[in-house]
Image: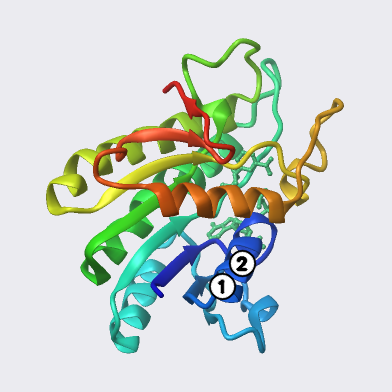
């Protein structure tokens, strides 16, 4: 059994990942933006009020990891936001906010957690297929696409640095998942549940090795283009 750190675990996909890992007997630490009450009584150790845009908060997360002792074998960064936008009415404050959370957030959180990762640890960053340059056939969603393209670069860059130290890194797309994040997206999509997404993401992390590090995976196992 291994020690997992899930960043962004209050609800949605992150919460489902924590619950499934705990159910199979893993030790789970959940860094939550809120109080982490969803984990009360579940056996998951919640670290409350970890905003990935705050250096002080992620330092507190690192302090909590140091205090609990055991190293983390697998870190999955799930935290993210989606704000819909359109050319002609862009809100650049919101563009910055999405970049700060979705692209800089995982970099800040992973860097802070590094001293607490075990030898041979794995890092997964939940980005999004819409962050793929090669897969962008429709445009739109400026802030989200830009922020998730940045998150993909964070994952690939971390792979270059960390695989040399024996840590494998993957960028992950969870699928189209019915959560609060997607509820306002117009159009009909074949949504999967947070539990289905979590199952696929956990499978991808189980399969991740140094040989497959530095790639972008759909939770369903398909490799995605950058
Ligand atoms: N749903 C999809 O179809 C889909 C598709 C592709 C990629 N993704 C990505 O998957 C991840 C999870 O999405 P979801 O659908 O589960 O969304 P969600 O239900 O809205 O959950 C997002 C989580 O991120 C947390 N969060 C937001 N801002 C944060 C911050 N500044 N610091 C720390 N945590 C923060 C939220 O905390 P609070 O609950 O406290 O607000 C929440 O726990 C995101 O990165 C998203 O971009 C989702």
All told, the count of numbered labels is 2
Which of the 4 quarters of the picture holds residue 173?
top right
Density class for disc 2 (Cα within 10 Å; few <14, some 14-19, many ≥20) is: some
On the picture, is 193 further left or further right than 206?
right
Residue 7: x and y, percent?
Answer: 49, 62
Q: Residues within 10 Å of mark 1 (few under 14, many from 20)?
A: few
Q: Is residue 209 left or right of residue 28?
A: left
Q: Secondary structure at mark 1?
A: loop
Q: Which residue is mark 1?
A: 24
Does residue 140 lie above or below 154 as drawn? Answer: above
Q: Nearer the viewer, mark 1 or mark 2?
A: 1
Residue 38 placement (x, y as % from top left): 69, 76
Q: Can I make out residue 145 in this image?
A: no
Q: Is residue 31 left or right of residue 220?
A: left
Which residue has dot 2 on it?
A: 20
Asked if the residue at tag 2 contacts the one at tag 1, i.e. Cβ–Cβ closer than 8 Å, the answer is yes
Query: Which residue sits at x=60%, y=42%?
Result: 174
Pick the front one: 88 or 12: 12
Q: As drawn, is 85 to the left or to the right of 223?
A: right
- Above or below: residue 202 compared with residue 129: below
Who is closer to the viewer here, 159 or 59?
159
Picture residue at 56% right of the left edge, 29% below the top: 129
């Amino acid at each position: 059994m291994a020690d997992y750190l899930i960043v962004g675990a209050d609800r949605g996909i992150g919460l489902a990942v924590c619950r499934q890992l705990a159910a199979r007997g893993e030790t789970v630490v959940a860094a939550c933006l809120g109080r982490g009450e969803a984990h009360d009584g579940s056996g998951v150790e919640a670290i409350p009020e970890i905003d990935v845009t705050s250096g002080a908060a992620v330092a507190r997360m690192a302090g909590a990891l140091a205090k609990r002792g055991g190293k983390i074998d697998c870190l999955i960064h799930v935290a993210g936001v989606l704000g819909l936008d359109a050319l002609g009415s862009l809100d650049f404050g919101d563009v910055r906010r999405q970049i700060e959370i979705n692209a800089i957030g995982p970099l800040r959180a992973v860097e802070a957690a590094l001293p607490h990762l075990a030898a041979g640890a794995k890092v997964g960053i939940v980005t999004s297929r819409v962050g793929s340059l090669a897969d962008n056939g429709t445009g739109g969603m400026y802030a989200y696409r830009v922020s998730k393209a940045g998150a993909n670069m964070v994952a690939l860059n971390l792979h270059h640095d960390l695989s040399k130290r024996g840590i494998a890194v993957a960028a992950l797309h969870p699928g189209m998942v019915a959560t609060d994040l997607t509820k306002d997206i117009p159009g009909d999509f074949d949504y999967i549940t947070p539990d289905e997404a979590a199952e696929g993401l956990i499978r991808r992390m189980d399969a991740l090795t140094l040989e497959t590090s530095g790639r972008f995976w759909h939770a369903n196992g398909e490799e995605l283009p950058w």
